[in-house]
Image: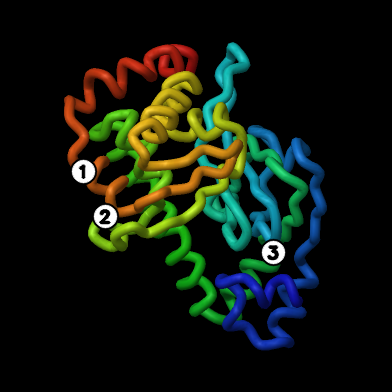
């Protein structure tokens, strides 16, 4: 119950209700690299990340990997497919030592029957994920590779919301190869863009920690990026696109 109470999806439940959901839940401690589930496994539960990071990915017949999503503490995954009675169609793996909460389908349905507001919260979460996927499609189709990298560093904040000379540090939750796969870029292109931004005095790279020296300048740089999204940015990704 104490882990459930910390998560947005369950924070409106009473102590008794938390205990009921907890009775149908399990805690899983995973070491870095450990598999949560594989494509084709039966989907009888969804997962909430209590601590750590997890990646969702697909594998091509050649064995090459395409990262679909990188997720951290407080985020959930698997709930949409759970209601289709279909197996998982993605793979999931812990990127770091992680603690996951697996919530069974039976516990979720029981809570939905008891309180329709819980269903609305689940629908709200799935709706936000759907909008996120639409934004991903827009980004891949309409923005250059450089713009994708800058937007990833700036996060979801609107460009106009960045304060002048604002300093922040972005800690990459995974290797640059994994991040570049998430952005549909080659690792070489991703690294090249980072070093170009560093040479321009916009960021400072320290291993996986990337310090944004001036968020406003970086946002302005992204807005003023020249060139068609269908030339340099996508050309750099052709090797990855052909592998998947």
Residue 68, relative to residue 83: is it above or below?
Answer: above
Q: Does any portion of residue 102 appear in the rendered image?
A: no
Picture quadrant of residue 88: top right
> Where is the N terminus found, in terms of image quarters?
bottom right
Q: Does any portion of residue 143 appear in the rendered image?
A: yes
Are circles 3 and 2 on residues that touch, CB within 8 Å? no
Report, in whole angstroms, how far the alpha carbon at label 1 lies from the one at label 3. 47 Å
Question: What is the number of the mark on residue 106?
Answer: 3
Considering the numbered disc 3 on the image, is that residue within a helix, a strand or a loop?
helix
Picture quadrant of residue 57: top right
> What residue lies at 60% left-to-right and 79% top-to-bottom?
11
Q: Nearer the viewer, residue 36 or 123?
A: 36
Q: Residues within 10 Å of mark 1 (few under 14, many from 20)?
A: few
Question: What is the number of the mark on residue 136?
Answer: none
Q: Nearer the viewer, residue 220 or 52?
A: 220
Q: Position of residue 243 (x, y in %)?
A: 49, 14
Q: Position of residue 224 (x, y in %)?
A: 18, 39
Q: Position of residue 10 (x, y in %)?
A: 61, 75
> What residue lies at 57% left-to-right and 39% top-to-bottom?
206
Considering the numbered disc 1 on the image, is that residue within a helix, a strand or a loop?
helix
* Left or right: 147 in relation to 21: left
Q: Residues within 10 Å of mark 3 (few under 14, many from 20)?
A: some
Residue 182, relative to residue 163: is it above or below?
Answer: above
Question: What is the number of the mark on residue 223?
Answer: 1
**Which residue is disc 2 drawn over?**
159
Of the residues under marks 1 and 3, which one precedes in the sequence?
A: 3
Q: Nearer the viewer, mark 1 or mark 3?
A: 1
> What residue lies at 33% left-to-right and 29% top-to-bottom?
145
Q: Nearer the viewer, residue 160 or 3?
A: 160
Of the residues under marks 3 and 2, which one precedes in the sequence?
A: 3
Are circles 1 and 2 on residues that touch, CB within 8 Å? yes
């Amino acid at each position: 119950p104490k882990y459930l109470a910390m998560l947005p999806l369950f924070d409106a439940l009473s102590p008794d209700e938390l205990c009921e959901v907890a009775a149908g839940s399990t805690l899983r401690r995973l070491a870095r690299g450990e598999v949560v589930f594989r494509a084709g496994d039966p989907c009888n539960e969804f997962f909430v990340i209590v601590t750590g990071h997890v990646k969702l990915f697909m594998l091509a017949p050649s064995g090459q990997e395409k990262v679909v999503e990188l997720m951290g503490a407080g985020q959930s995954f698997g709930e949409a497919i759970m209601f289709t009675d279909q197996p998982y169609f993605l793979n999931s793996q812990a990127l770091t030592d992680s603690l996951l909460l697996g919530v069974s389908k039976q516990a979720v349905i029981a809570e939905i029957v008891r309180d329709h507001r819980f269903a609305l919260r689940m629908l709200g979460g799935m709706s936000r994920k759907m909008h996120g996927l639409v934004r991903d499609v827009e980004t891949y189709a309409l923005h250059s590779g450089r713009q994708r990298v800058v937007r990833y560093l700036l996060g979801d904040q609107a460009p106009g919301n960045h304060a002048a000379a604002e300093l922040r540090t972005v800690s990459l939750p995974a290797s640059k190869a994994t991040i570049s796969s998430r952005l549909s870029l080659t690792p070489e292109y991703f690294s090249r863009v980072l070093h170009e931004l560093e040479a321009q005095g916009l960021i400072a790279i320290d291993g996986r920690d990337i310090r944004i020296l001036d968020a406003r300048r970086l946002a302005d740089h992204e807005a003023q990026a020249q060139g068609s999204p269908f030339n340099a940015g996508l050309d750099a990704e052709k090797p990855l696109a052909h592998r998947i």
